[in-house]
Image (cartoon, grey):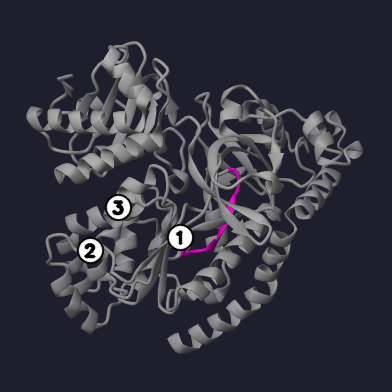
Amino acid sequence: MSRLLNALLWSRMQLLRWTNWRQLVAAARHPGRTQSRWLRRHLAHNADTRFGREYDFRTITSYEEFAERVPIQTYETLRPYIEAQEQHGEPTLTADPPVIYAQTSGTSGKPKLIPILQSSLENHRRSQGSQAFIQFSAVPGAYSGRLLPIVSPAVEGTLPSGAAYGSASGHVYKNMPTLARAKYVVPHEVFEIEDYDLKYLTILRLAVPARDITFMASANPSTFLRLLDLLAERRLELLEDITSQHFRHLDELPNSIADVVLPRLRTPEARVAELDSVLRLPAPAFKHVWPELRLLTTWTGGSCRIALSRVVETVPEFTRISELGYLSSEFRGTITIDIERNLGMPTIHENFLEFVERDDWDSGDRRAVTVEHIELGREYYVIVTTDSGLYRYFMNDLVEVTGRFHATPTIKFVRKGRGVTSITGEKLCENQVIEAVQATGDELGQPTDFLLMLADPEESCYRLVIELDLDRTAADQWGRSVERALGEQNLEYAQKRKSGRLRALQIIPVVTGTGELYKRHMLAKGQREGQFKLVALQYAADCTFDFTRASPTQTSVDPT
């Protein structure tokens, strides 16, 4: 059966080469023309919406007119249109109705609802197909075995209006061709399990017996850390269940999900015998459980680097790590067209993209440029217009131009724009904090799986939360090392510390598992698990989690 599936898969990939890939290349060769055509078509299609009438889409003939007439938007400026469309079915933003909404947290405390149209799902599916072809071609054997993508559920709940909310990735997963679903280890129903630990236990119970997993994917590497931690914690329980061809938590699952899981619990005796050794290890790694793993796809930049560094240590030496791409609830921003160099082509065939150079935006200059005009090595804020009704929408995301694919610049996500703080003019960046903590962890031989730097303007100091068991002496040593690394990267930080305008860095060690509790806290506040991004640097006033309750000790750095 596997040979037949792989033969059919090869045929499918050749079809994608002649459809999706060729279209991608054609778009990349003429980015300006591609974007102009997309914008004209999109404005014409939505000219009779309320938003389209207010800004007279029918008379807009160029990007310049579009940028001059339509102001840059935030979610709050679009919220009345989205809510009217969701609650009353009024075509306020798009002529086509949303089929579902993505719900995520908002800056005002009220959740954001991002419309997802049928065309949005089709775009997502097409991009997934392009990405699959690229991975299939670049990493031999990546798709030869079983596949373990972990996504958010297609439907997560229902709004008061009756409209459903969920995730585009979950919809695509659920509606993949039969060929792809045959290779999935985990059926889509499992992602609908509401209990956090039960869901991951079920994923492990289905995935651990599959020795031939060659591909794993999840947006955030913290998902893989959770699998590793749960695997170590429940390994003997899993071994007992696999040996008895049972799952002790089956009765805790909804009947519809249990019916899907039950037929998949059978494990060949040879694999049971192998797992009898593997699962008796104190901390089984992915390379022990899935020795044929060829490709792991996830976010690799920004704050995700901390979690990913631990994951990389657990996979086989030959496993390739691939960037998932610039992806958010609002839209898919890139397709990783070169795995080796991590080059992400902007989705210019699916969205209209504008860019404002970082320093210009931060100084109040809002003049934007189109994709063909962005320059290598520079950082830009992203403004996007999508087919789902976001118009000139400020993402508060910083991207860097990394290269070129044909005539189109490639970009990578750097960090959220709010990942910059300034108490006395030091303008500390999230990247600087991450690098300082990584350097300290390496220097002291104490890497941490979780960090969060909190800026407190009232106390004129920063507080660094790290998931490590440290006594006061060790915490002092950690603090001095981080301060030194920050000062080397950020001269303003060093000067402000030397002058006393910034008080000593406070180190808050927290017990193991605090990072996971923080993630759950943020999910409870409305963030979706599949799109959760840790903002490793933020203002203390914006953080609603009480880390002091998880801290056995707290110390400030001695300036000497």
Mark with earlier residue (3, 2): 2
Above or below for 172 versus 106: below
| SS category of the residue bearing label 1 | helix
Q: Which residue is mark 3?
A: 309
| SS category of the residue bearing label 2 | loop
**Disc 2 to disc 1, C-alpha distance:** 26 Å
Query: Where is residue 286 shown, x and y percent of the image?
Result: 27, 65
**Disc 3 to disc 2, C-alpha distance:** 14 Å
Above or below for 195 versus 340: above
Pick whichever, 513 or 239, lies toward us: 513
Pick whichever, 151 or 428, lies toward us: 428
What range is drawn magenta here?
Answer: 330-341
The mark found on residue 310 in the picture is: none
Q: Which residue is mark 2?
A: 285
The image quadrant that residue 457 belongs to is top left
Disc 1 packing (10 Å; few <14; some 14–19; many ≥20): some
Residue at 33% over, 39% down = 434
| SS category of the residue bearing label 3 | helix
**Disc 3 to disc 1, C-alpha distance:** 30 Å
Pick whichever, 178 or 244, lies toward us: 178
Q: Is residue 235 left or right of residue 353?
A: left
Closest to the camera, between mark 3 and mark 2, is: 3
Residue at 38% over, 46% down = 304
Q: Which residue is mark 1?
A: 189
Amino acid type, callout 2: Ala
Mark with earlier residue (3, 1): 1
Residue at 66% over, 55% down = 408
The image quadrant that residue 27 belongs to is bottom right
Which quadrant: the C terminus? top left
Instruction: State yes or no: discs 2 and 1 in contact (Cβ < 8 Å).
Output: no
